[in-house]
Amino acid sequence: MRASRQETGCPPSAGEPASFGQLLRSLRQQRGLSLSQLANRAHFNRGHVSKIENGKRPPSVSFARACDRALDAGTTFATIALALESASRPQQGWVRPGQLPSAKRNFVGRQEEMRHLDGLLRGAEQTLAVPVAVISGLPGVGKTAVAVQWAHHAVNSGHFRDGQLFVNLQGPGPGTAATPSDVLAGLLRTLGVPADRIPADLDQRAATFRSYLHGREMLLVLDNAADAQQIYPLLPGSPGCAVVVTSRSRLPGLMSVAEAATLRLTELCQPEAALLIRAIIGDPRADADPGAVDLLADRCGRLPLALVLAGEHIVSRQQRSADALARELKPERARLNLAEGDVVLRDAFATSYRALDEQSARLFRLLGLLPSRLIDADATAATAGVSQDEASRMLRGLASMHLIHRQDERHYLMHQLLRTYAADLARQMDKEAGHIQALRSTLDGVTTGAAPLSSLVA
């Protein structure tokens, strides 16, 4: 059988429309690039590029965008690839979901984090693996807001044209996390799969989900994940897809399965925290007492949830400035009661606390009684009455839940609002309340290296 012009690399005859591969080869040669040089610039395998040039493999949209960049071709190849994909895709029964929640109008900061997520998406064009990002951090730090804001940014930039899926996995509280089987059933229904065609078996549901996403460019946002086991069955297999997970846990184990990239959020810096309050209460109120805005940002621990609740408090009560609320929040325990509607700051912390085992929960409460945010492993062992190895294990566990975070090999820090919450819990329990004075005397006798602990935590 005679080889086609496309397979032999011959240019199309007069009047014959050029294929994607022929156009790619022609422009590559005009740029003076070899096949290997284009492959290196586009970050794709040379054999992959060769097959597309010869018409043996259809181009993906991500590949086309990489070629546009490598050849400085504007959107030439991406436009063709999108048209080819649309023409070849069976439309009947396909539902293009758009489940993203609305973006935040007063979104502030997080530029570095957004660039990090952009890099993840760009990296997806260099590999056949599905990119997975895990956004983690302490309660109320704004994980969902960052995920949703970035997702809208990506969609507005032309990515994920086949749709976006958003699922609240309802972790990490005990007994509240959604099961992967139920989540998959909901996702398949969203994609238009009739209920009687959804398999009963978890593995079959996962395979059906991957099949429906095959060859498509979809974004899957999995919010509030409890653990890695909840995520595994939900991962797509098509490299045109991407997954963003938010969790209060680091989700250990997900890296080995999905090569997930991790992004840990911390509280906002002081200028950004004040800017967020200003964005919510408006310039007239903020300008009425700028110092009160800065003080309020500090008393909210620069934690986005607390900052938003404080700003909404001022607006809903039609206060003229931030001064009254800043004074009201001078007592640390008062800050835990920040609330608007059914959203309460204390409840956000309680969800993570209830996920702890009994021993870790007790240690968390005791850490709130320490004279400083700085937590020393040796002092923790003495405080909790456990071995140093056991204390180190429990501290690592609390750090994996972002209830504390590591400062160096032997020291951790606790966010000021979490510390207030832990101390408040301790005072509510008779045994822990009676432990306060004993702690003060014990800690002064504990040494870390050559220095007394009191010199470290004072």
Image (cartoon, rainbow, N blue to C red):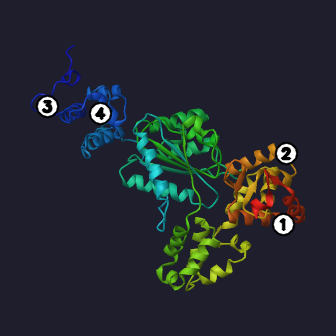
Q: x and y percent of residue 90 in the render?
A: 36, 38
Please name the residue shown 19% across and 15% down the image: 2
Q: x and y percent of residue 41 in the render?
A: 32, 36
Of badges 3 and 2, nearer the viewer stands 2
Question: In whole angstroms, how far apart are the C-alphas of marks 1 and 4?
Answer: 66 Å
Question: In whole angstroms, how far apart are the C-alphas of marks 3 and 2?
Answer: 79 Å
| Label annotation for residue 38 | 4
Comes first in the chain, label 4 or label 2: 4
The amino acid type found where label 3 is placed reads Glu
The amino acid type found where label 1 is placed reads Gln
Q: Quadrant of residue 39?
A: top left
The amino acid type found where label 4 is placed reads Leu
| Label annotation for residue 428 | 1
Secondary element under disc 2, as helix, strand or loop, is loop
- Decide: is 248 above or below 203: below
> Mark 3–mark 1 contact, CB under 8 Å?
no
Please name the residue shown 24% across and 32% down the image: 33
CA neighbours of label 1 inside 10 A, class few (<14), some (14 to 19), many (20+): few
| Label annotation for residue 387 | 2
Q: x and y percent of residue 445 in the render?
A: 87, 57
Q: Nearer the viewer, residue 282 or 43?
A: 43
CA neighbours of label 4 inside 10 A, class few (<14), some (14 to 19), many (20+): many
The amino acid type found where label 2 is placed reads Ser
